[in-house]
Amino acid sequence: MTLTIDIWATLKFLAAAILVAATVFVVVMIVSRIRSFFASRKFEVSDREAMKRRWQEIQDMALATGEVSHKLAVMEADKLLDQALKTLAMPGMTLGERLKFAAYKYPQLREVWWAHKVRNQLAHEASFHLERSMAIRAVKTYKIALKRLGAI
């Protein structure tokens, strides 16, 4: 009985196995780092208390009479959400970019896009008229998002 070993084929198989193992190791390490990065980001008690106080002011503005108060409430709620996402170290230059990134971890944040679009209309369209009901709906949407993030 004769045993023949193809050394070249054996070396190729070993190289492929090592490459697959190294690739799996790198992917697992990257995923682990990403998870630990986001898991460790939480609000400090003082940050949360300050955001809660600011949120109460925003709610008071939303419930006040007058379109200016309603517009201001939406604009300030948008700023507070942006501050919360920055605190959680969400990358991006704008709130829109941070929202896109955050929506992967918090899919419920996709609902905030409507309110953010209302805010953009307020900021960029001088003739935009904001109804009280629309302002209250936008502020509630921001509230849900902020609660989901643990900011308030």
Image (cartoon, rainbow, N blue to C red):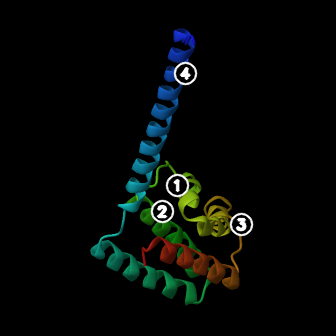
For the residue marked with disc 4, what is the amino acid? Phe
**C-alpha distance separating marks 4 and 1:** 44 Å
Q: Secondary structure at mark 2?
A: helix
Q: From the image, tell me which residue sits under label 4.
A: 13
**Which numbered disc, 2 or 3, marks the residue closer to the eye?**
2
What residue is at 43 percent from the left and 74 percent from the top? 150
Vertically, is 143 above or below 21?
Answer: below
Q: Position of residue 10 (x, y in %)?
A: 53, 17
For the residue marked with disc 2, what is the amino acid? Asp
**Dot 3 or dot 4, earlier in sequence:** 4
Q: From the image, tell me which residue sits under label 3.
A: 127
**Dot 4 or dot 1, earlier in sequence:** 4
Q: Position of residue 108 (x, y in %)?
A: 61, 69
**C-alpha distance separating marks 1 and 3:** 28 Å
For the residue marked with disc 1, what is the amino acid? Arg
Is residue 89 visible in this depiction of the protein? no
**Dot 2 or dot 3, earlier in sequence:** 2
Q: Secondary structure at mark 4?
A: helix
Q: For residue 113, what is the image quadrant?
A: bottom right
